[in-house]
Image (spheres, rainbow, N blue to C red):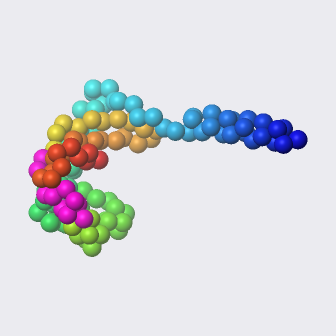
Amino acid sequence: MMTDRFTILLLLAGVIAISSCGCVSREVPLPPEERSAIIAFADPVTDNLMQGFSENNYTLYSRDFSVQMREGLDESVFEENRAMILSKIGPYVSRGDPVVTESGEYLIVRYPGEFVQEKDVEIR
């Protein structure tokens, strides 16, 4: 009786584990032509964001935000996040060339970044 329950639970756990594998979205690199178009859009947005961060300028930082993004990340949240980042990894120095991937319906652009106290930071 006890081994039957254990076997059923084990099988159920296996089915759940296998079925959940299909739900996990994998990141796939974009083809070069699509990648170029995304980078042409993302680079200026990222540069505004990081320049605004460096200059403590919320207006520049949030220049490319939607209304919804501005509501979620208002100036007080920006100041708190900026202070926390500066205390942990210091001021922003630079970024490298991005890697663009696709995960489900989302495009992800990752830049290797450098800050004064941390040389290998992912800017996403």
Where in the figure is residue 111, as x and y percent of width and height?
A: 23, 42
Instruction: State the residue at coordinates (29%, 41%).
Output: 109
**Magenta run includes residue 98:** no
Which span of residues is magenta-colored?
Answer: 84-94
Q: Residue furthest right?
A: 1
Give the quadrant of the N terminus: top right
Q: Is residue 50 above or below residue 55?
A: above
Q: Is residue 63 above or below residue 105?
A: below
The answer to whether residue 3 is left or right of residue 28 is right
Where in the figure is residue 47, as x and y percent of width and height?
A: 16, 50
Q: Is residue 49 above or below residue 19?
A: below
Q: Is residue 48 visible?
A: no
Front in this rendered view, residue 90 or 96: 90
Front in this rendered view, residue 24 or 3: 3
Q: Is residue 50 visible?
A: yes
Front in this rendered view, residue 17 or 51: 17
Where in the figure is residue 113, as x and y percent of width and height?
A: 19, 45
| Quadrant of the image occupied by residue 8 | top right
The answer to whether residue 120 is left or right of residue 16 is left
Instruction: State the residue at coordinates (73%, 35%).
Output: 11
Instruction: State the residue at coordinates (17%, 45%).
Output: 119
Where in the figure is residue 17, as x and y percent of width and height?
A: 62, 37
Instruction: Count the numbered circles shown.
Output: 0
Front in this rendered view, residue 55 or 91: 91
The answer to whether residue 5 is left or right of residue 40 is right
| Quadrant of the image occupied by residue 32 | top left
Q: Residue furthest front?
A: 2
